[in-house]
Amino acid sequence: MAGVWARRGSGLPLLALSVFGFCLLLQVNAKRPPKTPPCPPSCSCTRDTAFCVDSKAVPRNLPAEVISLTLVNAAFSEIQDGAFSHLPLLQFLYGRGLAEGGWWLLNSNKFTLIGDNAFTGLSHLQYLFIENNDIWALSKFTFRGLKSLTHLSLANNNLQTLPRDIFRPLDILSDLDLRGNSLNCDCKVKWLVEWLAHTNTTVAPIYCASPPRFQEHKVQDLPLREFDCITTDFVLYQTLSFPAVSAEPFLYSSDLYVALAQPGASACTILKWDYVERQLRDYDRIPAPSAVHCKPMVVDSQLYVVVAQLFGGSYIYHWDPNTTRFTKLQDIDPQRVRKPNDLEAFRIDGDWYFAVADSSKAGATSLYRWHQNGFYSHQALHAWHRDTDLEFVDVQAGGGVRTL
């Protein structure tokens, strides 16, 4: 059917569309339906949420904008390293299980193991709930990288202990739930008692499952004096407020010392152990503007320190008990040792030696031997090799093989 044309000046609107043209125009201008976001068959997704049931692994092809992920009755037992690294915007992670009467939040999956760095890349994650599973142990690195985590629940698992400082990476954690675990309140959880006494995190009451004397006692109320522990863990003992590039402990006249190479302070610093205060204290300093190694050696009851420097030459100093100071004993050939990088001292058949690894192109890794009043060049080892490290190995069995 032809279009209708209004007469000029009649005041009627001008129409110039046929029926076919009108239908075509409507088809062109119609809005397209919204694009469905990617979603695995086991999940229901919107642009920023995903709800997955019976998944055999952490789903990979989810919308990149997902901020909330719920796993219901997951059909896998291990959360492996980097399992969620493809979801950098994730803020909420839940595990749910189907229970009579409806869905129970954070309940009844089959997780038994959470790997190191399992949540790598989730710097925006705020809520992490993994409850009513079968997790027996965690690594101290399980929660590494979760800088934004504020709420964590591991309730109703089979945790018997927790590694020291597992919560240290969680800087702003405000709520923690560990209820329903079979904690063994022995020396391995002493750190947790100390942490609970000082943390600002709100922690739901936790109860001991063993040993019998602590059973049903609240962990928060355990007195620290009840823990008579011998621990093999390394803990921070003393902090020295300066940088150093090498440290060498040694004994001299039955006292304990440490020699530190400090190029920033232009010195080899010698510290002595104070048996009263039970800490290291300043003892003496040897000038060394570019020291990379300060190697102490006690030869015939005399103390020597080999000072290896990147620039300005390397030297040997001797401790003079009469003046109670270090004095320079000799230079090390600067044409042979141009850029020292490592230094080792050792004995062979009762004689003292030290070797310097030279990392320059024109120098040579060299061996020096003690003879009466000083150390003298004994052997050039690797020339033109740019050596950066050396180790002395003494194998006595089978003929006594010694090698550098």
Image (tube, helix red, strand yellow):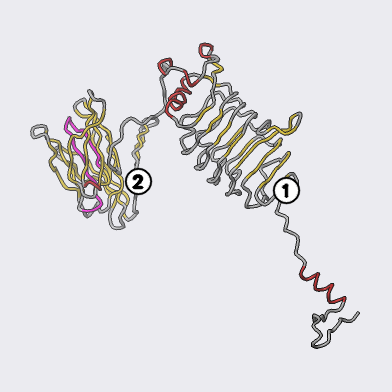
Q: Where is residue 314 in the image (x, y as percent from the top left)?
A: 21, 48
The one nearer the camera, 65 or 276, is 65
The one nearer the camera, 192 or 233, is 192
Dominant SS type (magenta): strand
Q: Where is residue 97 in the image (x, y as percent from the top left)?
A: 70, 33
The disc at residue 52 is none
Q: Do the residues labelled 1 and 2 touch (CB within 8 Å)?
A: no
Q: In this view, does 371 lie to the left or right of 147?
A: left
Q: Nearer the viewer, mark 1 or mark 2?
A: 1
Q: Dot 2, crowdedness within 10 Å: few (<14), some or many (≥20)?
A: some
The one nearer the camera, 303 or 120, is 120
Tell me the kind of residue under disc 2: Asp
Q: Which of marks 1 and 2 is nearer the N terminus?
A: 1
The magenta stretch spans residue 140: no
The one nearer the camera, 178 or 255, is 178
Q: Dot 1, crowdedness within 10 Å: few (<14), some or many (≥20)?
A: some
**Secondary-structure class at tag 1:** loop
Q: Where is residue 280 in the image (x, y as percent from the top left)?
A: 25, 31
Q: In this view, does 91 lie to the left or right of 339?
A: right
The magenta stretch spans residue 305: yes
Q: Which residue lies furthest to the bottom in this view?
A: 8
Tell me which residue sits at (38%, 29%) in the image: 235
Tell me which residue sits at (25%, 48%) in the image: 264
Question: Which residue range is magenta in the image?
Answer: 294-311
Q: Is residue 277 left or right of residue 9?
A: left
Q: Mark 2 points at which residue?
A: 389
What is the quadrant of the N terminus in the image? bottom right
The disc at residue 40 is 1
Tell me the kind of residue under disc 1: Pro
